[in-house]
Image (cartoon, grey):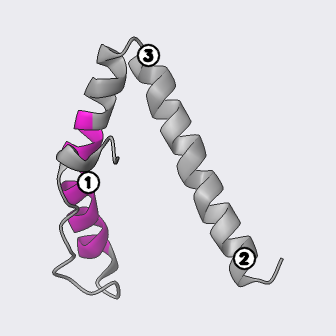
C-alpha cells in the first residue's frame, strides 16, 4: 500500500528543460503543495518540521548522487 498515494499526482511539466529558469519555477510550483502536505503529515506524526526538511534535503541529495554514480558506471 502506498502511504502517500492520496497526496495526489505530480503534474507533468508544460515547459521544456532548456527553458531552465521557467522550468525550475514550474517544478517548484508543482511540488510545493505536495511537500507542504508531507511536512504537515510528518509534523502531525510528531516529527519536528525542521528535522523533516533537513532529512528530505539529505535524501534528495543522496538520490541524485546515487543516480549520478550509477550513470557513470561507478
Q: Is residue 11 left or right of residue 59?
A: left
Q: What residue lies at 27% left-to-right and 57% top-to-bottom?
A: 28
Which quarter of the figure is the C terminus placed in?
bottom right
Q: Over which residues does the magenta segment extend?
A: 21-37
**Mark 1 or mark 3: whose residue is earlier in sequence:** 1
What's the distance in space between the residues labelled 1 and 3, CA to CA?
Answer: 21 Å
Q: Is residue 34 magenta?
A: yes
In front: 34, or 21?
34
Q: Nearer the viewer, mark 2 or mark 1?
A: 2
| Extreme residue toward the right, this view | 74
Q: Which residue is mark 2?
A: 70
**Mark 3 or mark 2: whose residue is earlier in sequence:** 3
What's the distance in space between the residues labelled 2 and 1, CA to CA?
Answer: 25 Å
Q: Is residue 55 magenta?
A: no
Q: Which residue is mark 1?
A: 31
Label disc, if present, on residue 41 of the rendered structure: none
Q: Is residue 8 above or below residue 37?
A: below
Q: Which residue is mark 3?
A: 47
Q: Is residue 40 left or right of residue 52?
A: left
Q: What residue lies at 25% left-to-right and 49% top-to-bottom?
A: 5
Is the C-beta separation of discs 2 and 1 under 8 Å?
no
Q: x%, y% of residue 53? A: 45, 32
Q: What residue lies at 23% left-to-right and 73% top-to-bottom?
A: 22
Element assignment for label 2 = helix
| Extreme residue toward the front, this view | 1
What's the distance in space between the residues labelled 3 and 2, CA to CA?
Answer: 32 Å
How many numbered callouts? 3
Q: x%, y% of residue 57? A: 52, 43
Q: x%, y% of residue 34? A: 24, 46
Amino acid at each position: 500500500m502506498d502511504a502517500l498515494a492520496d497526496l495526489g499526482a505530480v503534474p507533468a511539466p508544460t515547459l521544456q528543460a532548456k527553458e531552465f529558469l521557467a522550468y525550475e519555477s514550474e517544478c517548484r510550483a508543482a511540488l510545493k503543495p505536495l511537500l507542504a502536505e508531507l511536512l504537515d503529515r510528518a509534523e502531525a506524526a510528531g516529527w519536528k518540521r525542521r528535522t523533516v526538511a533537513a532529512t528530505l534535503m539529505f535524501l534528495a541529495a543522496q538520490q541524485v548522487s546515487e543516480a549520478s554514480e550509477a550513470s557513470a558506471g561507478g
